[in-house]
Image (spheres, rainbow, N blue to C red):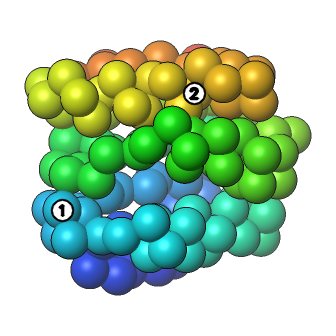
């Protein structure tokens, strides 16, 4: 079920799998900090509304780099809101190392590190891992 779509992000829900998918689109190369924050607030509101146990973050086409300041903001403003909802997070990461590192650094921050998380380059493998009982 499609929950939200913008030029930067598509959020879908697979209720039967208790899975929310946050897919960043190629247009993210044009995204600014305020637009990123807006998308993150929409995402966390969807988590609060539907309470999925699992999250798949699709970063294969993401062109936006999460700065250290934004990493801190995510850990302060976003993660605490769905810390007790999401049990497992899988990241489909691009081969572009800079983007992957910025995502990993965000998740290593104090609050982000509390999520059970793994990084994949295969959606099939990510989904297998996500479906392990939470």
Quick one: SS at disc 2? helix
Query: What residue appears at the point 79 percent right and 63 percent down from the top-left corner?
Result: 48
Indicate left or right for 134 with 122 as reference.
right
Which quadrant would residue 23 be assigned to in this image? bottom left
Of 43 and 36, the residue lying toward us: 36
Residue 81 placement (x, y as % from top left):
82, 53
Could you give the CA–CA distance between mark 2 and mark 1, rounded to whole angstroms? 21 Å
Q: Pointer 2: what residue?
A: 107
Which quadrant would residue 107 be assigned to in this image? top right
Indicate left or right for 81 with 123 as reference.
right
User: How many C-alpha atoms fall within 10 Å of the one at disc 2: few (<14), some, or many (≥20)?
Assistant: many
Q: Is there any visible trace of residue 51 in the rendered image?
A: no
Query: What residue appears at the point 49 percent right and 74 percent down from the top-left corner?
Result: 34
Residue 44 placement (x, y as % from top left):
68, 62
Quick one: SS at disc 1? helix
> Relative to 71, does residue 90 appear above or below in the rendering?
above
């Amino acid at each position: 079920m499609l929950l939200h779509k913008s030029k930067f992000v598509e959020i879908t829900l697979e209720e039967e799998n208790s899975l929310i998918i946050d897919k960043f689109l190629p247009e993210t190369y044009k995204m600014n900090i305020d637009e990123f924050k807006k998308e993150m607030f929409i995402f966390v509101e969807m988590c609060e509304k539907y309470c999925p146990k699992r999250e798949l973050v699709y970063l294969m086409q993401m062109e936006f780099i999460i700065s250290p300041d934004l990493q801190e903001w995510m850990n302060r403003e976003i993660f605490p809101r769905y810390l007790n909802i999401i049990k497992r997070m899988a990241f489909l990461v691009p081969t572009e190392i800079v983007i992957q590192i910025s995502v990993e650094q965000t998740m290593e921050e104090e609050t982000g590190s509390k999520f059970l998380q793994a990084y994949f380059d295969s959606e099939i493998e990510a989904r297998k891992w996500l479906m392990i009982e939470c």
